[in-house]
């Protein structure tokens, strides 16, 4: 079956680094997305990985290992505004639909 | 700032009511989506439209009825809903349906409560 796993909730300290993991089991693979969703707001696009390796975009980086069915989102120099849910989604090969994880709620403490 | 707007933002309705959710995208996209988001559950894709034609209906109960009059507007008509239909309903759009890096852009959602 198709499955995306992420931790339900994580807590981190302002100024620190946090890594949010995502593992997937899908019949095919055509890219992995990370979205950020603040409470009561729209999910907003953060990153897209289709090749193995690390993609860096300011304080946020996303890593992909296709052989392991694994990705992580790395957030550096955490700020209070980073408190949000982070959604992982995989696009199956030959399909426009996205398979979504349940999201990881990240709580930042001072 | 995402270019996708949804109204109303909050809706409370009884099980016998009829209401409609509206979505508008200002991005010139050709594909639009309705999702249901329940607490601690993955997003559930409900309907997909491409160039105003419905291309996906993921076994959604008939009490949900979508309408896409043009490529910028999408509606979700609701009637005789059940309490378990209470959720956040998200609209999204993308340039096209093609896979790969095609990114979906979301509206802020309508928080629906069915009493």
Image (cartoon, coloured by chain):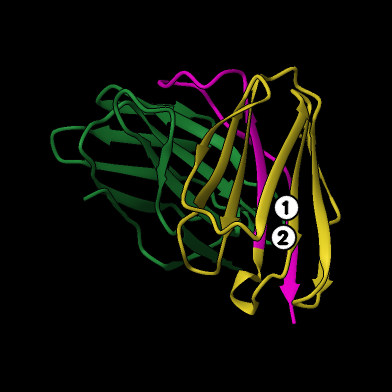
Q: Residues within 10 Å of mark 2 (few under 14, many from 20)?
A: few
Q: Position of residue B16 (x, y in %)?
A: 79, 75
Q: Residue furthest left?
A: A67
Residue at image point 31% right, 32% down: A92
Q: Is A22 located above or below residue B50 in the figure?
A: below
Which segment did they paint magenta?
Answer: B88-115
Q: Quadrant of the C terminus of chain A?
A: bottom right
The residue pinned by badge 1 equals B109
Circles 1 and 2: CB atoms closer than 8 Å: yes
Q: Is B88 located above or below residue B12 in the figure?
A: above
> In this orientation, which residue lies closer to the viewer: B5 or B36?
B36
Residue at image point 66% right, 49% down: B90
Chain letter corresponding to the colour green = A
From the viewer's perspective, tell me whether residue A70 is left or right of residue A60.
Answer: left
- Whether discs 1 and 2 lie on one chain: the answer is no
Chain letter corresponding to the colour yellow = B
Residue at image point 23% right, 41% down: A26
* Disc 1 chain ID: B
Label 1, label 2: how far apart the Cα atoms are: 8 Å
Residue at image point 21% right, 50% down: A1
The question of residue B112 being in magenta is answered with yes
Q: Residue furthest right?
A: B8
Q: Position of residue A3 (x, y in %)?
A: 28, 52
* Dot label at residue A40: 2
The question of residue A105 being in magenta is answered with no
């Amino acid at each position: 079956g198709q499955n995306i796993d992420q931790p339900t909730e994580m807590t981190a300290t302002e100024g620190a680094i946090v890594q949010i993991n995502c593992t997937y089991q899908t019949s095919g693979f055509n890219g992995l997305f990370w979205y950020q969703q603040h409470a009561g707001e729209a999910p907003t696009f953060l990153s897209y990985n289709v090749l193995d390796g690390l993609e860096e975009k300011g304080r946020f980086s996303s890593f992909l290992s296709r052989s392991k069915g694994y990705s992580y989102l790395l957030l550096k120099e955490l700020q209070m505004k980073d408190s949000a849910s982070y959604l992982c989604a995989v696009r199956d090969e030959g399909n426009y639909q996205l398979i979504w994880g349940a999201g990881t709620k990240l709580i930042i403490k001072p | 700032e995402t270019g996708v707007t949804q109204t109303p933002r909050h809706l409370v309705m009884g099980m016998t009511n009829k209401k409609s959710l509206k979505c508008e995208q200002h991005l010139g996209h050709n594909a639009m989506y309705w999702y249901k988001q329940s607490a601690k559950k993955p997003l559930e894709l409900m309907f997909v439209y491409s160039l105003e034609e419905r291309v996906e209906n993921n076994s959604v109960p008939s009490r949900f009825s979508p309408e896409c009059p043009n490529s910028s507007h999408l509606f979700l008509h609701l009637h005789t809903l059940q309490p378990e239909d209470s959720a956040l309903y998200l609209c999204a759009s993308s340039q096209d349906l093609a896979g790969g890096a095609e990114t979906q852009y979301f509206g802020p959602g309508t928080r629906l409560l069915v009493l």
